[in-house]
Structures are given as structure tokens and as C-alpha cells.
Image (cartoon, rainbow, N blue to C red):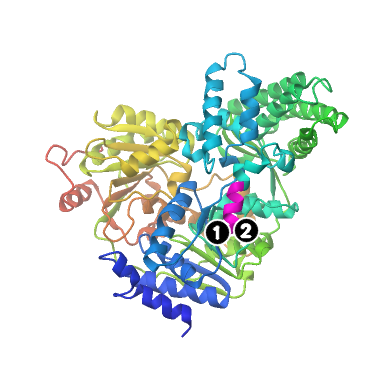
């Protein structure tokens, strides 16, 4: 038995350091098995896929052997909230219990840190016309940035949630002046990178991991240090990164920043070299016209083929980029910013070429959220498993041991849903630790209301809202409604605001800000301020509400990807080429994993209590229903509303004033 295994077993023992430090704590068997599997991977190298149920203690199961081994490790998780939770919570708490001097650091993308130079320049330029209030905020921000240790904008939610202000106060890899910057010595990004370089455990997010790989391909670095071990927490979210791996994107906020940076040349050493303000105005107008046309023409949000009817407006944007690029070439050497701006213009123009390609050419996609948040996407050749394998293994770092862990990596013992998507069948060796079928959770129940219209039919949202209004007050906790699109979330929030009992507050996560909605579910007393949050996107995964404060989670419809999603189409074609049934092997498995993720927001372990509702009667009527229902095998199925009310009474969650209300 190795020294690491011996120390690990001692730490997990009933009289070990963790039990002494945390009274009442004991290692659960799934946690023990996973910790031993992680330790074996650290010692022998290779890749471990560890799927463990929600609430099984995955975080300690991977952190404990990592800290005991003493290896330098990168932990990549899906959100900034989880980064802080690990670095400020679990890691120091575990290190203290073990008596180990562990240094942990959080590292984010540069867009999360205030740029001292850009804020200082914005303050010195003075207020723009009609923007006195913003200038006052910039002065306050500069004072904070100069005394802040980290300069992390997540410390200032009002700034982090304001896209227009953030665009002024952060730098990008293209706009950063690097050593030429007068504030280089006290740059918050560089300080964060130095702290990461000195740390034993560096906590990053998946987006930064992807950014680092892209940077390495261009001969630079996003600041992520090398490590011998990499752990991907919430590893199922890596699948979302795969589709971006070989694409080039021109994002609307980045284009807006570009034209703002061009305009600023009129006040520096390059002033007079070109009519910068006029060039920037032409570009901003073209960008705004294209965004408004897209907003009018598009039927849905998300990734989709480029709508060819907007080619003329895209061409206007291309002409604006061409004009400013010529001016930037002529002004070379007049300002340190000019060369970087020229590179950005070329990159944006290369993406735009795909939009202007002949009709039918699969060379441009659109990723749409709203008029301020969208991107032109130019897909590269499908590099297949090799590129995904690089993303999933840390090969660019020479990482020897890699762990992927999540509650949802697949629905069969080989975890092929995750393994194949990330090219991990090419990694040798690969260990798979799939949790055995757990016993049913007594406090967890799920239901599909009878009689609802199908999601595409009129009246679906109103009928589902009546169910939510009937059951939420009986559950003595907050409620979360998850929709598959932001537009659907907006509509549902409006309907619920008119339907919920008067004492209930309805928060739309997008309009209210993700942080406020997140905090309402996690920290506010549901008895005093009962809240229903309506959300999409990130709230489907990664939200951990403690102490059973969340008692109802509702999914508005089955989470199938739109059929014209270009990334889905590529995956379906690949499945056909492999002789598989595309619907069964791709779309059904995706939907089952998404349902499990959504249900995991409610029940975090065997002691959890609550009701999970799928507001889609197709789960009852379609032949694929049993396959999706199998994703919730640990949950008690409630056949009808009578069964729902009986279950509520049995759980002692009802009150006399609300028992028996109908959602019909």
C-alpha cells in the first residue's frame, strides 16, 4: 500500500483528522471510493471519469487526495461563484483540518479584473456629454481599484452587471498594452497571475481553460500555470466548450469596445493621423443597424445558421472595418495601441467573410441573446476527437493526472456521453467510476401535471404558472423555474407576477441580475420573503442552495436543443456516420442529462426534500418518455394531483390554508 493511500485512509477514518475537526462528519462509501480512485490516478497517471450522485461529497473526494499528495494542481469549475466557494471555503477548511500549509489562488479571465490604465484614462478624459453620473462612478472605481488587493470586479456587483461600464474599465487580450502600459507594475491581472504561479492549488473556470489553450496556440499564455494534476469539477459543462474550440467569434460587445478604442485614438499620440471619431461613428452605426435588424428577424435565441437576409448590413460593417484598417496601417508607429487595433480589425473581418459567403455555404453561424449580446461565429473544420482530447486532458501543460467529476457524465456504465464528446477514448489509461444505482430518496418526488397544453400550444405558460402558484406556498421554501430560453423566462416571469400569491416575490434572473437572484435563493428566509426565481442558462447547473431552502424546481419544457442548432446538426451527422440512431444516441441522452442537472438544483442528497415538476406532457405521451423518466430513478413518481397533495401532507410541508389547492 502506497504512502498516499495510507494517509488517505487515515484521513477518512472515524478517528481521523477530518472526524476530529468536524464533529459528526464521517466518510460516505461513494466518497471513499472516489477518493481512492483519485489517489490511484495521481499516483499512476491517466484520466479518471468519476460520476457520483449529487450530495455524495465529490469535492472532498478529489481535494483530499490532491492536498495529501502535495502535487501542484489546477481545479477548473464552471462558474465564478464556485471558484470562490472552493478557494475561500472548501480548500482552506480542508487544509486546516489536515494541518497542511496549502496556498490556493483564484484566477479568472482578464475581463473580470479592473484595468487601472483604462479607468485612469477614462477619468482624465473627463465626462462624455450627458454622462456625468458615469464619470463620477469611474472616479470612485479608480479610487477602489488603486487600494484593492485583487481588483476583482465580482467584488463590485453593480459594475460587474453593467456591460457598458465594464467595457470601459477592463482590457482584453487584444487591447492590453502589456509591458508598454504605464500601470504594468501594479496591474491586477498580472498580480493575479503571479499569485497563481506561487500557489499549490489554482482554481480557474472552464472558460479560462479554453482561453489558455487558444492563447498557447498563438504562442502566448492566459496566465494559467503548469501543473501535474488537473481536476475538472462540474465536468459535464466542458461539452459546451467543445463547440467553441475550433470556431472564431466576433462578439458584439468586443466590436463595440473596438469602435470605442478607435475613437479614443483621437485624444492620444495618433490624433490627427486619421478622422478617428468619424470612422468609429461609421462602425458603431453599422453595428447598431445590424443588431436591430437581427432582433427583428430572429425567431429564437441561441446558436443558429446565419440569416442571409441581413447580408447587406453585414457588408456595411465590413466596409467600416476595411476603412479603419487602412487608416490604422497608415498610422503605424504613432501610438502603441495602433498595431493591436489593426490585428483586431483583421480578426473581425475574417469572421465577417463567412457571413458574406454565398448562400448555402455553411461558413457562418449566429449566437444570439439580444441586441447587445450576440456573436458572429465562423466554424473551422471539425477537428474531431483529437481537439476535444486536448481540451479535456491538459496535454498542453503536460498534466500527468486528470480527473473529470460530475453527477451527470452519462447514462450507462461506460459514460460514453461525456467520454466520446471529449475524445477521451484516445486517452490511455482511462478509469471509469460510475456510481452504483442509489436507493430512492424518500423526500424527493417528481410530477408531470396532466392536462397541460404542449409547450408550443397557446396557454401553456399560464397553465403551468397556475400549478406553480398552487404548489409553491405548500412547500415552505423558495421556488425555481427553469426555462430553455431567456425569452421564455421573461414571459414566465411576467405571468407568475400576476399569478403568485401577493406575499411572493418573483425575480427574473436576467433582469434582476444573476447575483441578486442567486442570493435570494441561498441566503434569504423563505418564510419571511418567499421567492420564485425564473431563470435559464447557468441556473440549470452549478446552483447549490443549502439547508433545503429551495423546495420546488419546475422545468418549463423538455430540454431538447433546437433542431437547426448547427452544433447539434454536426453531432447528428457524426452519429449517423457511426451507424447510430441520432435521436436516441444524441438528443435523448442530452435531454436526460439536462433533466438530471435541473433536478440536482433541488435535492443535494438523501436528506433533501422537495418537488420537481416537468411542465411538458410529452413526457407522458411520447414513446421516449420512459427513457427520460429513467434519469430520475431516485425520485418518487407522483401520477396525478391527488398523489401530489397526499405526498405534500406526508412530508408535513403543508398548511391548512393551502392544502388541496388545484392547479387546474
Residue 453 belongs to the span the image colors magenta:
no
Residue in the image at 21% along x and 51% along y: 643
For disc 1, the marked residue is: 199
Quarter where residue 429 is shown: bottom right
Q: Residues within 10 Å of mark 2 (few under 14, many from 20)?
A: some
**Residue 249 sits above or below residue 319 on the image:** below
Can you see residue 568? Answer: no
**Residue 283 sits above or below residue 359 on the image:** above
Look at the image and tell me in which quarter the C terminus lies: top left
State left or right for residue 401 relative to residue 495: right
Residue 204: percent from left, percent from top: 54, 53
Direction bottom: furthest residue = 1
Residue 609: percent from left, percent from top: 26, 53
Do the numbered discs 2 and 1 sit on residues whose CB atoms are within 8 Å? yes
State left or right for residue 475 relative to residue 318: left
State left or right for residue 125 relative to residue 533: right
Query: Of 561 and 23, which appears nearest the observer?
Result: 23
Residue in the image at 33% along x and 32% along y: 506
Query: Of 59 and 417, which appears nearest the observer?
Result: 59
For disc 2, the marked residue is: 225
Chain part drawn in magenta: 191-199
* SS at mark 2 in the image: loop
Amino acid at each position: 500500500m502506497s504512502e498516499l493511500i495510507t494517509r488517505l485512509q487515515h484521513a477518512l477514518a472515524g478517528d481521523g483528522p477530518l472526524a476530529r475537526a468536524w464533529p459528526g462528519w464521517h466518510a460516505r462509501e461513494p466518497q471513499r471510493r472516489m477518493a481512492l480512485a483519485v489517489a490511484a490516478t495521481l499516483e499512476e497517471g491517466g484520466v479518471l471519469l468519476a460520476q457520483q450522485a449529487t450530495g455524495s461529497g465529490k469535492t472532498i473526494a478529489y481535494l483530499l487526495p490532491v492536498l495529501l499528495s502535495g502535487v501542484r494542481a489546477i481545479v477548473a469549475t464552471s462558474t465564478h461563484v464556485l471558484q470562490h466557494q472552493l478557494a475561500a471555503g472548501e480548500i482552506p477548511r480542508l487544509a486546516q483540518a489536515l494541518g497542511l500549509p496549502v496556498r490556493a489562488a483564484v484566477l479568472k479571465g482578464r475581463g473580470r479584473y479592473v484595468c487601472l490604465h483604462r479607468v485612469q484614462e477614462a477619468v482624465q478624459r473627463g465626462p462624455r456629454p450627458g454622462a456625468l453620473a458615469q464619470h463620477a462612478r469611474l472616479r470612485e472605481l479608480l479610487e477602489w481599484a488603486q487600494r484593492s488587493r485583487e481588483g476583482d470586479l465580482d467584488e463590485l456587483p453593480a459594475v460587474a452587471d453593467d456591460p457598458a461600464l465594464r467595457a470601459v474599465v477592463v482590457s482584453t487580450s487584444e487591447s492590453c498594452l502589456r509591458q508598454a502600459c504605464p500601470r504594468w507594475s501594479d496591474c491586477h491581472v498580472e498580480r493575479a497571475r503571479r499569485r497563481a504561479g506561487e500557489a499549490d492549488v489554482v482554481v480557474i473556470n472552464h472558460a479560462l481553460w479554453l482561453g489558455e489553450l487558444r492563447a498557447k496556440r498563438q504562442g502566448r499564455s492566459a496566465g494559467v500555470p503548469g501543473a501535474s494534476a488537473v481536476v475538472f469539477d462540474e465536468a459535464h459543462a466542458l461539452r459546451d466548450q467543445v463547440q467553441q474550440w475550433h470556431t472564431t467569434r466576433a462578439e458584439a460587445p468586443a466590436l463595440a469596445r473596438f469602435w470605442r478604442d478607435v475613437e479614443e485614438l483621437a485624444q492620444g499620440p495618433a490624433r490627427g493621423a486619421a478622422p478617428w471619431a468619424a470612422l468609429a461613428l461609421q462602425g458603431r452605426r453599422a453595428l447598431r443597424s445590424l443588431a436591430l435588424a437581427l432582433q427583428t428577424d430572429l425567431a429564437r435565441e441561441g446558436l443558429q445558421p446565419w440569416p442571409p437576409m441581413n447580408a447587406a448590413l453585414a457588408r456595411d460593417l465590413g466596409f467600416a472595418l476595411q476603412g479603419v484598417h487602412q487608416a490604422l496601417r497608415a498610422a503605424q508607429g504613432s501610438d502603441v495601441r495602433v498595431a493591436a487595433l489593426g490585428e483586431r480589425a483583421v480578426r473581425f473581418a475574417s469572421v465577417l467573410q463567412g457571413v458574406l459567403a454565398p448562400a448555402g455555404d455553411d461558413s457562418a453561424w449566429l449566437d444570439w441573446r439580444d441586441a447587445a449580446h450576440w456573436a458572429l461565429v465562423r466554424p473551422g473544420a471539425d477537428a474531431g476527437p483529437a481537439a476535444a482530447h486536448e481540451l479535456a486532458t491538459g496535454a498542453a501543460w503536460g498534466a500527468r493526472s486528470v480527473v473529470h467529476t460530475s453527477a451527470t457524465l452519462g447514462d450507462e456504465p461506460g459514460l460514453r456521453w461525456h467520454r466520446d464528446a471529449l475524445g477521451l477514448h484516445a486517452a490511455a489509461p482511462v478509469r471509469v467510476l460510475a456510481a452504483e444505482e442509489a436507493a430512492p430518496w424518500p423526500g424527493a418526488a417528481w410530477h408531470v401535471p396532466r392536462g397541460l397544453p404542449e409547450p408550443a400550444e397557446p396557454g401553456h405558460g399560464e397553465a403551468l404558472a397556475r400549478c406553480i402558484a398552487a404548489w409553491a406556498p405548500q412547500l415552505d421554501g423558495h421556488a425555481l423555474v427553469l426555462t430553455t430560453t431567456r425569452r421564455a423566462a421573461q414571459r414566465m416571469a411576467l405571468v407568475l407576477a400576476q399569478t403568485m400569491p401577493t406575499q411572493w416575490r418573483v425575480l427574473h434572473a436576467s433582469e434582476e441580475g444573476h447575483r441578486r437572484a442567486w442570493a435570494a435563493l441561498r441566503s434569504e428566509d423563505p418564510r419571511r420573503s418567499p421567492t420564485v426565481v425564473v431563470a435559464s442558462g447557468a441556473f440549470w447547473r452549478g446552483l447549490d442552495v443549502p439547508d433545503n431552502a429551495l423546495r420546488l424546481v419546475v422545468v418549463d419544457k423538455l430540454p431538447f436543443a433546437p433542431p437547426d442548432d448547427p452544433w447539434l446538426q454536426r453531432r447528428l451527422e457524426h452519429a449517423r456516420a457511426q451507424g447510430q440512431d441520432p435521436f436516441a444516441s444524441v438528443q435523448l441522452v442530452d435531454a436526460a442529462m439536462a433533466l438530471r442537472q435541473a433536478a440536482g438544483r433541488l435535492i443535494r442528497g438523501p436528506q433533501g426534500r422537495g418537488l420537481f415538476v416537468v411542465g411538458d406532457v410529452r413526457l407522458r405521451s411520447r414513446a421516449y418518455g420512459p427513457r427520460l423518466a429513467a434519469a430520475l430513478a431516485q425520485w418518487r413518481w407522483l401520477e396525478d394531483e391527488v398523489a401530489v397533495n397526499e405526498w405534500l401532507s406526508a412530508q408535513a410541508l403543508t398548511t391548512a390554508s393551502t392544502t388541496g389547492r388545484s392547479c387546474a
